[in-house]
Amino acid sequence: MTRDRPTGGPPPASGGGPRAEAPAVEQPFDGQSLYVLRATLEAHAIQAGLPEGRTADLVLAVHELATNVVLHGSGAGTVRMWIADGSLECHVADPAATSPRAGVPGWPYEHGHGLWVVRALGDAHTVSSGPEGTVATVAFALPRPQRPPFRMARDDGAGRTTLRLYGSLDRRAALDLVNAVHAELTGHAATGHAEFGGGPPRRLVLDLTGMTSWDSDGIAALLTAQEHVNAAPGTVLILSGAAGEFRRRLDLLSLTSLTYEDPAD
């Protein structure tokens, strides 16, 4: 089995090995049943306690894996879902490959590929191949029972404005963040500092140290904030406190360069 390095908090997914307990979901699929598969995954992920935004990420990731089976594999397969080690673990099995292979090639992670999406969204992923076929696994960490609500704190000093983010940067918080950055840019432009020759650029720092969780909408909000800053003269955006794996995700998904205050891990 080949294993790509985990991309988040939970331990690496276990691949296609046997399990003693029955899966919460075990559903065959083909090209005609992907809609039903998505609805089933959504219902069970929400029931298991995965937040709304991360549920959408899980459904998208597993859909991409299943579509890969339909378009590039045997055309039909089976999805199984377990709760394991604090994560929702989804196995997408394709029976097309029926003999063990050494050195399963790495997934194509280029832009536009579904498996690149899986790598960007999942917290862990593996690919294994053996007598029962090829199994792609993606895992999503379940949240702590009590999650702090999202909030932001603002302070100025030393030629910079810092927005400190606390709690979960999810789809509910995404609009708050984008609006806060827009307000900072609008206020800065109103002072006249954005005009040519108005002095050095102001540094707008997003401090992510207090961020406890995220989803793809939260990541999109950060990237949207960067685009807004790029379009507005007189300000540079700096990200502070981005953990190594989260920083890797941002770089993977961003179409523009991001500036970090902290050195890379």
Image: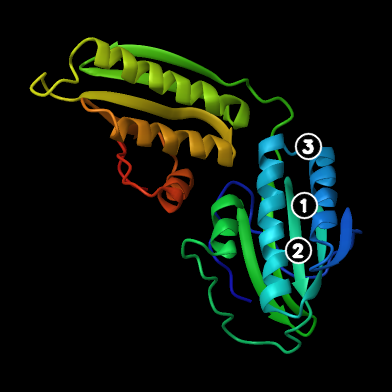
Q: Earlier in the sequence, mark 3 or mark 2?
A: 3
Q: Which residue is mark 2?
A: 91
Q: CA distance from mark 1 to mark 3?
A: 13 Å
Q: Which residue is mark 3?
A: 49
Residue 49 found in image quarter? top right
- The residue at 44%/53% (across/down) is 252
Is residue 200 visible from the viewing direction of this image? yes
SS of the residue at dot 3? loop
Q: Earlier in the sequence, mark 1 or mark 3?
A: 3
Mark 1 is on which residue type? Answer: Ala
Q: Residue furthest left?
A: 197
Task: Point out which mark residue 84 bears.
Answer: 1
200 to 124, vertically: above or below: above
51 to 155, vertically: above or below: below
Q: CA distance from mark 3 to mark 2?
A: 19 Å
Mark 2 is on which residue type? Answer: His
